[in-house]
Image (cartoon, helix red, strand yellow):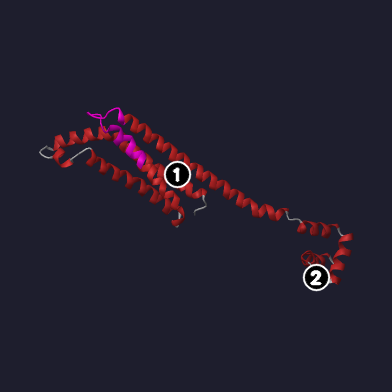
Amino acid sequence: MNCNIVKDLIPLYIDGCCSEESEKIVKEHIRDCDDCKKLLEDMKSPSDIVTVSESPKTFSKLNDWKASVLQSVLLFLSFALITVGVALEARTPSGIGNGFWALNLVIPATGFMLSLANWYFIRVYKSRKCFSNYSLIATLGITLSAYIWSGFHYEINLFDLFAGNDFADVLEILHALLLLNGIGILLTVVFCTLSKTLSNQYAKMLGKE
């Protein structure tokens, strides 16, 4: 019997869909043909199928775990920064130093930590780029909102601060404010950059295109 014909019959033989005559032909042929016998054994073996089907699942679970660890680490680190900032702020309850650590550490870290809540809704976003952009916007928006709130809390009235001053005085005031809040501004930029970069990596781990 021609090997090509037997090779065509082997899948039907394995599934038990061929006739008794065809089954007999295959059995007789593989007794003398090592190639066809090996083909039959390979097609019967489930090892290749298991490898193909389970490997992507294992890889996906590993990436899900990495994404979860990344989010947990970021939450822990941002919370640790907030704790340090609050502790340092508590040492200066009044005076010129009051509010320094709140503005320069607590608010930027809080803005970043709260923006991580957006990561729980990653399935809502159509693409990885969209998700990372909105994560950046969330970080910046929350941080700016917190700074506006701090202005009311510490009773900072910018209009009264600049009113009646000439241009040189205004520049000096701006310079002083920059020195006072320079760390906070820098950290806000850093956290916004991290938010966009790490959220993109997070989405990539979860298979978001």
The residue tagged 2 is 18
In the rendered image, the quadrant that contains the N terminus is bottom right
Callout 2 secondary element: loop
Asked whether residue 1 appears in the rendered view, the answer is no
Task: Give the labeled residue for mark 1.
Answer: 198
Q: In this view, does 183 lie above or below 208?
A: above
Left or right, 172 with respect to 103, comes to: left
Residue drawn at (61%, 49%) of the image: 58
| Secondary structure of the residue carrying numbered label 1 | helix
Query: In this picture, which residue range is highlighted in magenta?
Result: 89-110
Residue 144 horizontal/vertical position (percent): 29, 44
Count of labels in the image: 2
Can you tell which quarter of the image residue 175 is in? top left
Quadrant in the rendering for residue 190: top left
Q: Position of residue 148 (x, y in %)?
A: 25, 44
At horizontal 26% and vertical 40% (from top left) the residue drawn is: 150
Q: Which of marks 2 and 1 is nearer the N terminus?
A: 2
Q: Closest to the observer: 173 or 75?
A: 75
Q: What residue type is labelled 2?
A: Cys
